[in-house]
Amino acid sequence: MKVKVFGIQFNTGKAVTVSQFFDHLIASNTTNIDFHGFKRFLYLKKHDEKYIGLFVTTKDHKKFMEMSGDGGNVEITARDVTEGSALADFNFFVVHSATGRGLYQHYYHSCTFPQFGTFTKSYFEQLKGKMLDAALKGVAKKTEQTKLRQKFKDALVWTYFMRQESFVQLIAKLSRIKSFAYGISSLAAKESVFTPLGGLSKSVKQTYTFEPETKLSQAIEAIKSALGLIDIDDASVQGVDEKDEPVTIHLESNLDAFAEYDFDVVANKMSKFTPANFEKSWMTIELLKLFKDNGPRFTLVVDKG
């Protein structure tokens, strides 16, 4: 089994900064939380201009299956988890405090980044509500109240960063595609190249929303055709995964995976560690090295417009 490290980004909108959001997470109760049928434990700390974290998911089953032998003498045996313990999956991450960009470590059966983003969503909404309430205090005019509510309307968005070929492979794993958005590098594009998506766009940015009954294969073919025919940048797809969770996948020129390791090697390097001191673990140190080596991809601040 492989452990992979992917590029990620949190976008908190115009009213809430990434630092405010992550500081709120640090100040909140984020351990021993029931989420999607499992107990979750989020450990988070500020580290220079970054936030480093560990997300642990514990499984409640008390037995696991072990196979031994070879050939015709194979035997499968049910083993008990040590009393007082639980099976646990881990996901380490690092996020830049200004850009919201960073790295997320994942392996099969551990928590995916979209699931982790969904976990943090309620905390973001909680913070946004508190900030809006504070901003509305003493504001009597309805028009001013409306302006403030509009200011705080942005939702939390979490995205991957992938190469174009990986982008197509990733959206193929969705259960449904809701929309495809992109920026056009050249405004001199001819009308014919837009036919896979239904017509000519004269704007710098364009979004196509697919009808609920649109087949996944049809949406993917349209997107693939557009990617191959026009000079697109900053493309993204919004959809839902097999668990009906919202997913946004972002097209970037970053690497498919920033790093890849064998699970057994990682497990040996972290044979025993304390979650409260996760920053001293081998995986955190490795992520910080990767972050430093690829600095501009994470630290370059882009104007939100």
Image: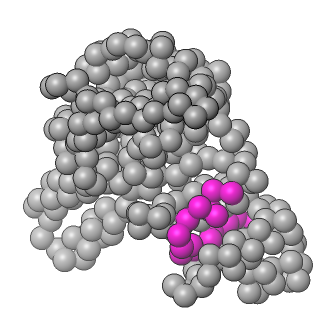
Residue 70 horizontal/vertical position (percent)? 58, 28
Q: Is residue 191 left or right of residue 90?
A: right
Closer-to-camera residue (182/254): 254
Can residue 94 be spotted in the picture?
no
- Name the residue at 60% across, 85% down: 214
Is 133 one of the magenta-colored residues?
no
Q: What residue is at 36 percent from the left and 29 percent from the top? A: 54
Side (left or right) of 165 relative to 70: right
**What residue is drawn where x is 32% and y is 35%?**
78
Q: Could you say where residue 146 lies in the image, as x and y percent from the top left? A: 26, 74
Q: Residue at x 70, y 60 (%)?
A: 168
Residue 284: name its quadrant: top left
- The magenta stretch spans which residues? 169-184
Name the residue nearer the viewer: 2 or 114. 2
Q: Is residue 285 visible?
A: yes
Q: Quadrant of the C terminus?
A: bottom right
Residue 149 figure quarter: bottom left
Q: Name, please, the residue furthest toward the front.
A: 72
Q: Is residue 156 left or right of residue 201?
A: left
- Identify whether 297 is placed above or below 152: above
- Viewer-side residue, 81 vs 74: 74
Q: Is the N terminus in the top left, top right, bottom left or bottom right quadrant?
A: top right
Vertical placement of residue 14 versus 38, above or below: below
| Residue 61 picture location, percent across and down | 25, 41
| Residue 247, horizontal then vertical, whole percent | 48, 60
Colour scheme of the picture: one colour
Please say if 265 is above or below 150: above
